[in-house]
Image (spheres, rainbow, N blue to C red):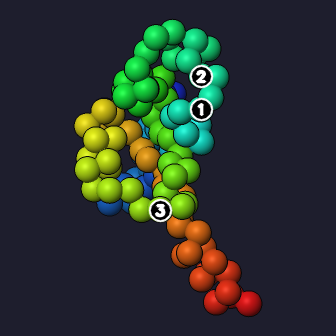
């Protein structure tokens, strides 16, 4: 997926100003790659759930993993997700509830 680039001024090692082209670091995705009602509206009718992530990754560059908040996924599950997505695809994992609660308690 192409993203627009932006130009900004930067100093080179010699001190001269030069124009640097950067891609923005903003990525758009959803809070999961499965949800009730997505078949037929987002996923093609009849698509197997096992194929959802591969299809999703053709439309978005990132997804939030909501299930990691409740439990740590098996290594085989994570490897499977990785195999179904292109290089550079980003998984945003929610911190486990236990860790989040410990942080909250520690900050009180």
Residue placed most toward the observer, 2 or 99: 99
Residue 85 at x, y = what percent? Answer: 33, 34
Q: Which structural element holds mark 3?
A: loop
- Residue depicted at 67% across the width and 81% down the height: 104
Residue at mark 2 to residue at mark 3: CA–CA distance: 24 Å
Mark 3: few/some/many CA within 10 Å (<14, 14-19, 20+): few
The picture places residue 66, in percent across and down from the top left corner, at 55, 50
Residues marked 2 and 3 touching at CB (< 8 Å) = no
Tell which circle, 2 or 3, labels the residue nearer the N-terminal end.
Answer: 2
Q: Which residue is mark 2?
A: 38
42 is higher (above) or lower (below) than 106: above
Task: Determine the residue positioned at 38% across, 39% down.
Answer: 89
31 left or right, relative to 3: right
- Residue 34 visible in the displayed image: yes
Measure the C-alpha gap from mark 2 to mark 1. Answer: 6 Å
Q: Quadrant of the N terminus?
A: top left
Determine whether, in the image, residue 76 is placed left or right of residue 46: left
Residue nearer the viewer, 58 or 76: 76
Q: Residues within 10 Å of mark 2 (few under 14, many from 20)?
A: few
Residue 35, numbered circle: 1
Per the image, the residue denoted by label 3 is 71
Q: Nearer the viewer, residue 43 or 60?
A: 43
Residue at 67%, 87% (x, y): give it: 105
Marks 2 and 1 in Cβ contact (< 8 Å): yes
In primary-sequence order, the first of circles 3 and 1 is 1
Q: How many marks?
A: 3
Tell me the CA gap for discs 3 and 1: 19 Å
């Amino acid at each position: 997926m192409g993203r627009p680039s932006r130009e900004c001024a930067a100093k080179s090692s010699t001190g001269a100003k030069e124009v640097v082209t950067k891609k923005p670091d903003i990525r758009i995705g959803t809070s999961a790659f499965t949800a009730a009602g997505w078949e037929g509206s987002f996923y093609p009718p009849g698509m197997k759930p096992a194929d959802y992530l591969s299809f999703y990754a053709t439309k978005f560059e990132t997804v939030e993993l909501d299930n990691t908040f409740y439990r740590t996924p098996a290594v085989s599950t994570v490897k499977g997700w990785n195999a179904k997505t292109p290089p550079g695809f980003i998984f945003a994992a929610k911190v486990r509830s236990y860790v989040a609660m410990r942080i909250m308690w520690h900050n009180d």
